[in-house]
Image (cartoon, rainbow, N blue to C red):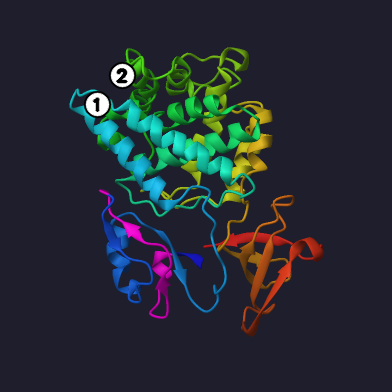
Amino acid sequence: MRLIHVKNLSPDMKLAKPIYDDDNNLLVNIHCKNIHKYKERLLNLGIKHIYIEDEKSENIEVENVVSSDLKRKCESAIRDTFSNIKEDKKINVKEITQNIKNLVDEILNNKNVLVNLIDIKSTDSYTFQHSVNVATLSVILANSLNYNRKQLVKIGTGAILHDVGKLAIPEEILKKPSKLNNQEYKIIKEHPSLGYKNTKNNHQISPLSRVIILYHHEQVNGEGYPDGLVKEDIHEFARLVSVADVFDALTSDRCYRDRWSARKAIDFLISKSGTKFDTEFVREFMKNIAIFPNGTAVKLNTGQKALIKEQNKEAPARPVIKIITDEQGNELDEYKTINLMNKLNIVIENELT
């Protein structure tokens, strides 16, 4: 399978991963042969990238750190949580916690897999999928830092609930397709405090999980919010989750921009390391991310185009690739698979969309 922009769909392509609507109902099933006919509908839903199967992408697999079934259960749980808060009902913390425990266990059982975390997100379901992705990335990072299972569950719980305060923010601000003005940004900055207020009296949620909700937008240089804390005063769980939060936000399609590549997002984290983000956490985070996720198209320094086939965990920038064109961009009659660990003269220049 390979990742493409929806605008590039053609009749010879089949869907490689199912697409669900905002209520987790199946919209288009795997192996659909007429996926190109859904182009406009998908774009109207805010879905810009999907995985497809064709001759070029044969034998390319995208490994899931967390199963699709569990991800949907987690999304459903956080969706129900948001709904209950809106209606002043009690949060089902037990459901959230059990799903996070299952997520932790799946991650512990797949610890050698680099994260290929490119999701098919619609505009309206972004918040729920983002919450689950941030929980997943946070637990992966925390596990890499040797936190114990109880700590992983607390981190995952705080991470999946980190944006619960956005319920009190008007949708026209959350989904505004252009830059926020000063007043709108001031309102957005209230969501950590509002989320903490919504959960602080729920003693089923660990105080450490609530600290994540309150402080995930603090920055180590003291320029974050809500309290402008510096590194030593920001709980390590919140510093950790802030890295995962920003990475997933940058690598997600939004109504106002296309997703960034994993490489560009990692470069941003590095550039802000020691100012916005904890340097140690950024360094460790990089070790667990596929800089060039499986199924993405890339351009090589030779002028050839290739697809990412497999990862080399010890050298994420040098994966196994399938070369699909010659130096002039002409498609090859026979595709070539090479391991960049063994071809040091070949370098990936950039990701293609």
Q: Amino acid at mark 1?
A: Ile
- Residue 281 placed where, x, y %? 64, 31
Figure label count = 2
Give the magenta part as a residue range.
5-23
Q: Are marks 1 and 2 in contact (CB under 8 Å)?
A: yes
Which labelled disc corresponds to residue 85? 1
Marks 1 and 2, how far apart at CA: 8 Å
Which labelled disc corresponds to residue 198? 2
- Residue 282 placed where, x, y %? 64, 34
Secondary structure under the numbered disc 2 in the rendered image:
helix
For residue 166, above or below residue 317: above
- Residue 38 placed where, x, y %? 30, 68
Which labelled disc corresponds to residue 7? none
Is 317 situated left or right of 33 in this image?
Answer: right
Image point (53%, 48%), residue name: 65
For residue 119, above or below residue 182: below
